[in-house]
Amino acid sequence: MTRNDHTIARAPTLTQSVAERINDAILDGTFEPGERLVETRLSGMFGVSRAPVREALKILETTGLVRIVVGRGTFVCRLNRDELMRVVVGHALLMGFVARLASVHGTARSFTALARAQRGLARAVDAGRSTEVRRQEDVFLTALFDAADDTVLRQTVLGMRGQILVHRSPLTPEVEILDRLGATAAELLSALTMGDPDQAEKTARTATLVTGFAIIGQKPPPSVDAYLDIQAPRMPAELTA
């Protein structure tokens, strides 16, 4: 396979591109939780026919970001407080498990890719650009799943992450959310490079829990105290150079 063939094979389809654009519109607040997504409106927004829009919405339904109700239409996910808190906890527990897998299966090459992705995320956070932070966090998470050698949990974890971001609290400053996303990636990378699967899992779980509850504007309830590791390590100076 030539380089050009490889590039073409990896090029996203129209449906995938539309799904990504709808996903971004939901995460940046263009569409709010519970809002109905009208196919004709989306077709006009993105300059495509209704067919790829319809298929794109089906893709987003599998991630939990939208809900398709027969006879009524498609709606941006809307969770009540208890449901949302369970999503935050479940997301953190799964991220901890993925971090454990990455610590066990990661290679020097995969950790180098993670460090590079973390630096890109840190630069985006410093610049304060929300869209770029989300894009760089996607790059970091892709590198993390590659290090973990896991494709089974990827869609579930990313879907839960999307649900949390959709329900971010308007009382939480955007800059705080960006800073926490960057800090989570830094702490996770630090733990992974220490080569201790237990600590990697604890750090990922704790950082993801704290960040998740901050994003939705809630304090972690006492019921999740057992999941928190207050001794999470910090980013080694040599990795930030």
Image (tube, grey):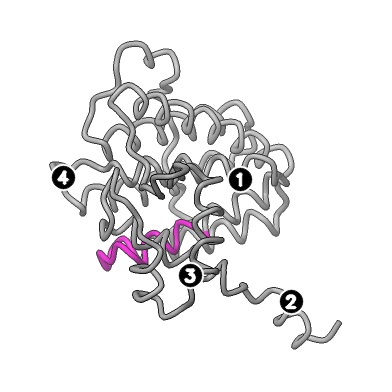
> Is the C terminus in the top left, top right, bottom left or bottom right quadrant?
bottom left
Label 4: how many residues lie within 10 Å, few (<14), some (14-19) or many (20+)?
A: few
Q: Nearer the viewer, residue 35 or 7?
A: 35
Highlighted range, magenta: 124-139
Left or right? Give the position of 211 relative to 2. Answer: left
Residue 34 quadrant: top left
Q: Where residue 159 sits in the image (x, y, percent)?
A: 49, 44
SS majority, magenta: helix
Mark positioned earlier in the residue sequence (2 or 1): 2
**Residue at the image position 70 percent from the left and 59 percent from the top:** 109
Q: Which residue is mark 2?
A: 9
Picture quadrant of residue 121: bottom left
Q: Residues within 10 Å of mark 2 (few under 14, many from 20)?
A: few
Q: Is residue 119 above or below residue 45?
A: above
Residue 210 rendering spot, x and y as whole percentages:
34, 32
Q: Which residue is mark 3?
A: 50
Query: Which residue is label 1 attached to?
Result: 154
Q: CA distance from mark 3 to mark 4?
A: 32 Å
Q: Position of residue 204 (x, y in %)?
A: 49, 35
